[in-house]
Image (cartoon, helix red, strand yellow):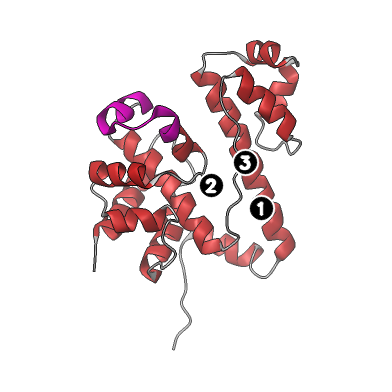
């Protein structure tokens, strides 16, 4: 049987630089976590309508510290500082430990991206989506911004109905069901690799989202 080849740039890079290299994989994972924390702090601050200086004053630190915390390359985040920021923004800090199974992580990351992109494709704000689905705004923010967040079954039920995704597939994607069809894992991996940025959906990202939705809606 001929060896399968790939034209996917992200997959080529992963195979070339990460395969069978635990240290490189750990480094990439650390960078991903740092970037997610930095993005979360920035998003919460801007949602609150605060400048870096104003948030620093609420937290009791300096603007330069907040700037470093919002830098995706910064690796010095501490739970105590994150908790101070959460309290200043009237949020609750929750620490989530997820399975190390790479397939589970890929599925949840794809779910995180998919929820963001579907909402943005319909040009809905978080508040508008909360009103249309009768879901809590804070939970919608959490499931979009934190790939490790585990939404409630009721939330998944309402989102599956709103977006037209079979509930069983939604539960699989969110990590609530562990018996995952190989085709879904493969599609999720491809979708995540093609959708690294979602501030504005590019033509390629829209195509990736459409392909992923077709895979999720196909029960066969």
The percent position of residue 155, horizontal first and vertical second, equals 35, 41
For label 3, the SS is: loop
Say whether marks 2 and 1 touch (CB < 8 Å). Answer: no
Q: Residue at x 59, y 37 (%)?
A: 94
Q: Nearer the viewer, residue 36 or 127?
A: 127
Q: Is residue 84 left or right of residue 195?
A: right
Q: Residue at x 62, y 36 (%)?
A: 37
Examine the rendering and report whether any part of residue 145 can be seen: yes
Which corner quadrant holds the C terminus?
bottom left
Query: Would you call the spot at circle 3 few (<14 residues within 10 Å), some (14-19), or many (20 or more)?
Result: few
For label 1, the SS is: helix
Q: Earlier in the sequence, mark 2 or mark 1?
A: 1
Q: Residue at x 41, y 34 (%)?
A: 140
Say whether marks 1 and 3 touch (CB < 8 Å). Answer: no
Q: Is residue 110 magenta?
A: no
Chain part drawn in magenta: 126-140
Examine the rendering and report whether any part of residue 203 can be seen: no
Magenta-colored segment: predominant secondary structure: helix
- Image height of 82 relative to 11, above or below: above
Query: Would you call the spot at circle 2 few (<14 residues within 10 Å), some (14-19), or many (20 or more)?
Result: many
Q: Is residue 65 left or right of residue 179?
A: right
- Image height of 75 relative to 178, above or below: above
* CA–CA distance in space, label 1 to label 3: 20 Å
Q: Is residue 108 left or right of residue 166?
A: right
* CA–CA distance in space, label 3 to label 2: 9 Å
Which corner quadrant holds the N terminus?
bottom left
Q: Earlier in the sequence, mark 3 or mark 2?
A: 3
Marking on residue 148: 2
Marking on residue 28: 1
Marking on residue 95: 3
Say whether marks 3 and 2 touch (CB < 8 Å). Answer: no
Say which quarter of the image contains residue 115.
top left
């Amino acid at each position: 049987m001929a060896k399968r080849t790939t034209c996917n740039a992200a997959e080529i890079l992963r195979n070339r630089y990460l395969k069978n290299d635990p240290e490189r994989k750990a480094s990439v994972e650390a960078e991903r976590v740092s970037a997610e924390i930095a993005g979360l702090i920035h998003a919460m601050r801007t949602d609150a309508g605060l400048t870096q200086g104003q948030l620093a004053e609420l937290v009791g630190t300096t603007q330069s510290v907040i700037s470093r915390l919002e830098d995706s390359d910064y690796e010095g985040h501490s739970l105590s500082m994150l908790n101070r920021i959460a309290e200043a923004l009237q949020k609750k800090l929750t620490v989530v430990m997820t399975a190390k199974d790479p397939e589970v992580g890929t599925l949840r990351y794809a779910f995180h991206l998919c929820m963001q992109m579907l909402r943005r494709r319909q040009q809905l704000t978080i508040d508008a989506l909360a009103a249309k689905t009768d879901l809590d705004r804070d939970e919608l923010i959490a499931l979009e911004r934190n790939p490790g967040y585990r939404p409630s079954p009721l939330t998944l039920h309402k989102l599956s109905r709103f977006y037209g995704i079979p509930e069983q597939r939604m539960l699989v994607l969110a990590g609530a069901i562990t018996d995952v069809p190989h085709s879904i894992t493969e599609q999720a991996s491809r979708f995540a690799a093609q959708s690294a940025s979602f501030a504005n959906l590019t033509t390629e990202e829209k195509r990736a989202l459409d392909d992923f939705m077709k895979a999720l809606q196909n029960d066969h």
